[in-house]
Amino acid sequence: MDAFNNLMYGFGIALEPMNIAYVFAGVFAGTIIGMLPGLGPISALALMIPITFSMEPSSGLILMAGVYYGAIFGGSTSSILLNAPGVAGTVATSFDGYPMAKKGLAGKALAIAAYSSFVGGTVSVIFLMLVAPLLSKVAVSFGPSEYFALMVLGLTAVVSLSDKSLVKGLIAAVVGVIISIVGIDMQTGTERYTFGSIQLLDGIDFLVVALGIFALAEVFYMLLRGGGGKEAPRNAIGSLKLTRSEVKEIAGPVGRSSVLGFFTGVLPGAGATIGSFLGYSMEKRIAKDGHTFGQGNIKGVAAPEAANNAACTGSFVPLLTLGVPGSGTTAVLLGALLVMGVNPGPMMLEQRPDVFWGVVASMYIGNIFLLALNLPLIPYIAKILDMPRPLLLSLILIFCMIGVYGMSFSVFDLLLLLGFGLVGLGMRLFGFPAAPLILALILGNIMEESMRRALQISGGDWTTFIDKPIALGLLLVALLSLGLPLLKKRRKKSASV
Amino acid sequence: MTSLTLKRLSVFALPLAAFAGMTTAAQAQEWTPSRSIEFVAPANPGGGWDTLARTMSRVIQQEGLADESFAAINVPGGGGAVAWAQVARDTGNPHKLFATSPPMILVPLAGASRYDHTDFTPVARINTDYSIILVAADSEYQTLEDLLNALKEDPSLSVGGGSAPGSMDHIAIAGLASAAGMDASSVNYIPFSGGGDAMTNLMGGHIEAVVGGAGEAVGQLGEGSQLRALGVSSEERLGGGLSEVPTYQEQGFDYTFDIWRGIMGTPDMPEEAVAYYEDLFAEMLETDAWREASDQLGWIDAYQNSEEFGAFLDQQQEQFSDVLSELGLLRQ
Amino acid sequence: MTRLNTNQWLALVLALLAVAYIAMAWQIPTFPLPRPVDSDLFPKVLGFSLLILSAFLFFEKPTPIAGADEIDQEAQQGPLLLTPWARIIVTSLAIAAYAFLLVPLGFVLASVLLCVGLTAYYGYRRHTVNLATSLGVVLALYLTMTRVMDVYLPTGVLPF
């Protein structure tokens, strides 16, 4: 029972009164940061480094980790209520969360998000505790070829995400990749599709597109349908309670997505956003009622929420066991640890067990705090929807713009946001699904980069993608996931004939 | 006043204001700031420039070195180009500074910025980091010579770095290859999305070696580590966790590479203001708070005043354009 | 020649965009160092994919425009400035104006103006509540960002 002893040691640290206070402060600040669109965990953590400067390393990391997973936890709130994702990791939550809120089930959606996040967070802490050292080997076994294969697998979800018209879904996905490659090409330093604008050199930020296509487009759409308060007053919140059958229904998705999310998080460079998309599209494919995903299916809220929180915890594996950051957020955390005089890496478990086990134990506590903090607040937060419609619409607009400006400090990005809002409105009117675009936007660039990196390492030899067992395996799964639905359809057809 | 728009809208008002500020400054014997200083980090929070700007602001404030506060402002975009374009329009403003490092030279040379270092006023060089070469702990390469010989024999061997071709890490390895008598462009440099990403790929055996910043790598070295350092680009051995790592020069390759960090100001910043900041920063480097912060961040002080820093920048530009033109990446 | 349906119009627009995109892909300079796959391959593949997909779209049976029936019919008859499409245009212009005035006016003033103005324009008549809520939310956000998070936001004409 080595892990048990270690965990008890960790709880000894995490349960010190000051550290309990830090966990609480961290998750509380994180929840709020997560709810505000734009101000993501990266900048929040970077700005906190001076605060943690003089702290005990374990306390500092406990506080900052709390902010990180708290933000992912809190991000679902604005995704569900306003269709404005608070952080990138919760975009997928809005696919079904927002339709639920529109049906008057906001309370239930928020409650499901909270429970699923809690389970995702807790399950992944258990994994983190038990297998972190082993997993570091898995993390490094992913080179460019493997990433390319993983991205291809992720992109096959486009097919299941485009409901009514496959052609329109594919067009949305191609446009998503087109947006993702704007800017300086990392592999050559060449500018692509920047139209000579220095504002576009760094590419188009994911959140600008997501806020535009989801939140702003939604505001425009509501304006078209009559912005006045003419709509029948709706049951804005609804009950928080889940029925037993609902609990049963989401148990599977939450469990699977927690595991999937954790492993996605372990891979450097993947993280919460990709994890939540993979969880969502996996459940959509597995579910018998997969076609109702996107219309307010509770599994569509549970899966991405469990996955993104699990991925967030998973991303601590490469950070703490290898000392390499897998994402922008963990890069900032690494910087903070270095400042506090801790060198994360293979030796950290031996040199600074207090930091590792203290943080792991604090994550259990933090997740309980988050649940206890969020559940009672749901009725009050959901009151937002009771606001007079005109006021709510303009406040959503303000939120989006503050979010974008606070992230990039760029007037240009505000205009881009407007542009994507109008594009999103058009897509809605003409029946182009938004989810494939967002998915392709996230994965497209990584897919291109890793493909070219792999080919440059192999000297242009394309067999690099099938010589490696992991890459080959992932590509085969991708092929299968494309082939199966087609086979199913054909069987159905032949059965009906 | 961070955005470009204001500058566009107030083309008339601002130069006048700046001019007014300048004349009063010139009349006074000794210039001191009259309002808080905008300290621009041309990148997002968390990066090297941001850390420099925020650490300096904090130390200056903690030690009460200046009457006015230094407000760190992030202006990300274009590897710095967005911020440079903005600062360049603020001619003569003595209340605006920005953090800088080799990309100030490299980005313009690659043709990605209309403004280069000569458009701005050098204020002071603050500190420096060095480039380091890493291989996996179980690698067959024991010395830098082993690695370079292998690269000579098989140019398809890949060396990873954390930045795009033609930027810092690539220049560092290409320059070394050149000094070792190889063709700079023959190195199969693989750009990753950051130093950490490159190191993970090295641990996983996907690439042969990694070139990166010594400060970033120090946490990866030491007992039980999966990585090993073959050489560092400084003139003398570094201290702390890197004291065992030989320099390139020690191993017979006459090549050094500085990842310097410094502060520059608006175009034609008044001399009095430059003098004020020079003294302020020199004083800051002497404080214990700075000592402590830079030890933890792995920074090595390398102060130069405005004049020396300006000459140093010119010399850096010359050196980098040689390497870039050898690589065929010079676009000016 | 029959009239083109919605999908066919969309397909034509997309095809034009795809052609322009492909043309631009050929302008991407070749990298001086040899690369197995250079910067231009992906854009070319994407451009042609879009072109082929728009051909498919051309022949796909169009679906009715989503929510066309839900468009506020009553307002469509009302004053021009309040028709549904006018709402979109006015809102877009307001956002653009906000973008350009944010720095000169300062964050607080510009945001409150936008919020109060649009709310009133959308038909909310309780101006005191409107002003109080907008001011409250904007100030709360502003103070959180600048005081707590240390994020710089333009102050503009107001002194803080």
Image (tube, rainbow, N blue to C red):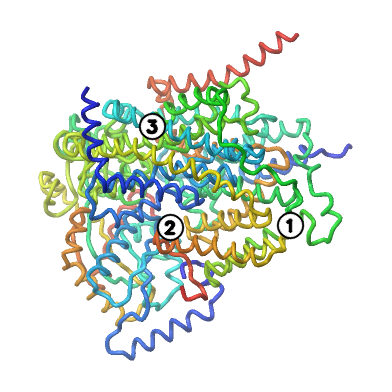
Residue at mark 1: chain: C
* Residue at mark 3 to residue at mark 2: CA–CA distance: 36 Å
Identify which amino acid the numbered label 3 is placed on. Answer: Thr
Q: Secondary structure at mark 3?
A: helix
> Which quadrant does the C terminus of chain B fall into?
bottom left
- What element does badge 1 sit on? helix
Is B306 placed left or right of B83 in the picture? left
* Residue C120, placed above or below residue A304: below
Say whether residue A221 is left or right of residue A281.
right
> Which residue appears at 68% of the width and 12% of the height?
A492
Residue C120 location, quadrant: bottom right
What x and y, as percent, mark residue A384? 59, 50
What distance separates the C-alpha of mark 1 from that of mark 3?
46 Å
Q: Is residue B290 left or right of residue C52?
A: left
Q: Given the current orientation, which residue lies at the most extreme right position?
A: C1
Residue A494, above or below A28 = above
Nearer mark to the viewer, of 2 and 1? 1
Q: Chain of mark 2?
A: B
Q: Amino acid at mark 1?
A: Arg
From the top left corner, tell me how far across and down residue A42 is, in percent. Answer: 40, 49
Mark closer to the observer (3, 2): 3
Q: Is residue C135 above or below residue B228?
A: below
**Nearest the camera: B168 or C153?**
C153
Report which residue position mark 2 lands on: B76
**What residue would you read off at disc 3?**
A122
For mark 3, name the chain.
Answer: A
Instruction: Identify the residue position indicated by label 1 in the image.
Output: C87
